[in-house]
Image (cartoon, rainbow, N blue to C red):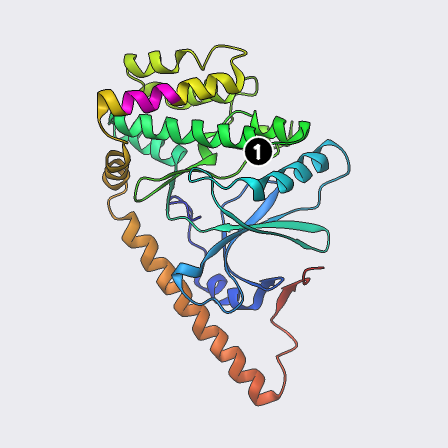
Amino acid sequence: MLAIESSPLPFEAALRAPEERLGQYSLLRRLPAGLRAEVWLGLPPGGASLGQLVAIKAFFPHARGPAAAALAAELSLAPRLVHPNVVQTLRIGRDAQRPFIVSEHLEGTTLRALLRRVRVARASAEAAAVARVLLGIVRAVGHAQRQAKTAAERALAAQAVAADDVFITFDGAVKLLGFKAQLEGVERRCLEFEAPNDATAPAAIDALLSEHLTPELRGVLGAACRPGSGSGGLARVGQELERWQTEVLRSDGRAELAELVEVMFPSARLEQRAQLDALLEQWMSARSLVASFAADNDAAPASGFRTIRPEA
């Protein structure tokens, strides 16, 4: 995952990347993250191309209690979420006391960044694009609720959906970035965006996109946004959205959503790809220098490496 509005790290930080590892994964660049974990752009063993990039979320140690239990539920649920509207989990690992999740790397923007840019531009999203985002969220949440096996996992799947947790790719795909445990009283106060803490997922969806809901879309969402509608409400709203797309819009909204991202961020795709190409080139060059130095001295240098403990 590489959010559009992330700030690039200094050049020297990029050059240090080949020296940093998490188990067998090479860590290339730190990505924006919350208080619970650090997120890295990385490569698996032997990886050296853009298509092999992954996102690695390494959690900070959690104290025993509700937070640790919620994290355990998150790690347990993530591998079972295999769905087009959920970011793909590739691996769950552990580094000493720090568990981590390896997931697919996405190019695009968060829904929050997109909505903010649309608001600043005083633009409006086409109904087909809005419907596609809504349906993607509904399908992802419904899938998570069906896969949840324990009470803790069901609680995760029932949490409100925050705009930062929804990712829009450049080609118009909609993916939830997993279902994360909340740190009550800490993360809610520190994050710039707060999801409604008393809202069901459908109600949060309505709140996130309220400025772009047409009267017709509001009618489609109405049944699911009633208190207590639960997963049955999600299923109904999904069915109504699909019917509306097919019979009224005659479009699944992918082209409209991709066009909206392109209009709001006209050069973002090329800029991100150029940044990634440059980062990989720097990493390959630095790795070659390290390998050459080690060969000349029959061993890797004793200093300059910050190796995170290998996986247990």
The residue that mark 1 highlights is 147
Q: Residue furthest right?
A: 64
Q: Looking at the image, can residue 31 be seen?
A: yes
**Count of picture labels:** 1
Where does residue 70 sit, x and y in percent of width and height?
A: 67, 34
Pick the front one: 288 or 152? 152
State whether the magenta stretch is mostly helix, strand or loop: helix
x 60%, y 40%: residue: 35
> Which range is magenta?
239-245
x 75%, y 39%: residue: 63
Where does residue 52 sit, x and y in percent of width and height?
A: 44, 60
Q: Amino acid at mark 1?
A: Gln
Where does residue 204 sit, x and y in percent of width and height?
A: 47, 21
Give the answer, above or below, for where 75 lies relative to 91.
Answer: above
Q: Looking at the image, can residue 192 be seen?
A: no
Q: Is residue 243 inside the magenta stretch? A: yes
Give the answer, above or below, for where 139 lies relative to 81.
Answer: above
